[in-house]
Amino acid sequence: MSAFDLSGQGRVALITGGARGLGRAVAEVFAEAGYRVALADVDVEAGRAAAAELTARGSEALFVATDVADSGQAAAAVAAAVERWDRLDFVLNNAAVAGRAAAIAELDEADLERVLAVNLRGPFNVCKHAVRAQREHGGGSILNVSSITAEAGSPTFAAYAASKAGVVALTRSIARHVGRFNIRVNCLRSGSIQGTGVMREERRSWDADQERRHALAMIKKIPLGRRAQPRDVAHFALFLASPLAAHVHGAVLTIDGGESLGS
């Protein structure tokens, strides 16, 4: 591959939370660029459908049912990609849950534990096994997905914000060690993404007017005047996986249309 080419021909990507939302958009963009794609997700039906659709389009795709909070399942997802294609060039740690919307006084320990298990232990588990695989195969890159709430906080999703702040620290810590193995590790702080938010579950009961008012309120916070499309973020991830980003390591990169600038 040319040093100025985003093509991933022959390369392999593992994407957690790849069945839908941002993960699926990244899978589609990477597949279009020539990557062979392994999708890891707890949603078996959606995951199989996503892999089947990519295959029907002429890409090589694999689905692995995975709860990243379980170290054994995280290891199995990494192993499945390596066994299928004998390499692992890129990993996107995207799987996440928002948890229940609640002020800290009403937040149950069980809610906190589940959010931290998926959002923080999950990337830890995947990184642990991905680093081992990439070290054995000459290197690669990892992109962990955080959120602008990691810095700004959230009045009703404290566990989510804390978990995403942990992802930032985890990324920097891993990066300090693995660069010597030709493994690059970076962190993506995303803002509001159209149609992919893990907090959508909290709005299932909203009517059309509530959704419209919520959308308008979100857009007012974004200087670019629109929420990100999933492919906006996916294209950024493709750049970070490519040789064009060969010296980007241990970075926390924001893609939010200016949302985190504040009013």
Image: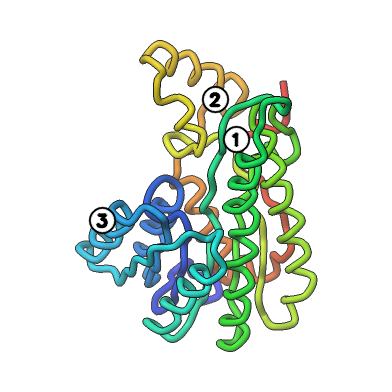
Mark carried by residue 49: 3
First-in-chain label (3 vs 1): 3
At x 69%, y 65%, the residue is: 248
Query: Is residue 97 or residue 188 the one in the foreground?
Result: 97
The reply to whether dot 2 and dot 3 touch (C-beta < 8 Å) is no
Q: Nearer the viewer, mark 3 or mark 1?
A: 3
Position of residue 92 measured from the top left corner of the image (x, y, whole percent): 53, 61
Q: Dot 3 surroundings within 10 Å: few (below 14), some, or many (20 or more)?
A: some
At x 48%, y 52%, the residue is: 234
At x 32%, y 69%, the residue is: 61
| Quarter placement of the C terminus | top right
Give the Cα separation between the discs numbered 2 and 3. 33 Å
Q: Which residue is mark 1?
A: 257
In the image, residue 99 sits, relative to residue 241, either above or below, namely: above
Position of residue 15 measured from the top left corner of the image (x, y, whole percent): 46, 62
Q: Quick one: SS at disc 1?
A: loop
The reply to whether dot 1 and dot 2 touch (C-beta < 8 Å) is yes
In the image, residue 81 sits, relative to residue 253, either above or below, namely: below
Give the Cα separation between the discs numbered 1 and 2. 8 Å
Q: Which residue is mark 2?
A: 225
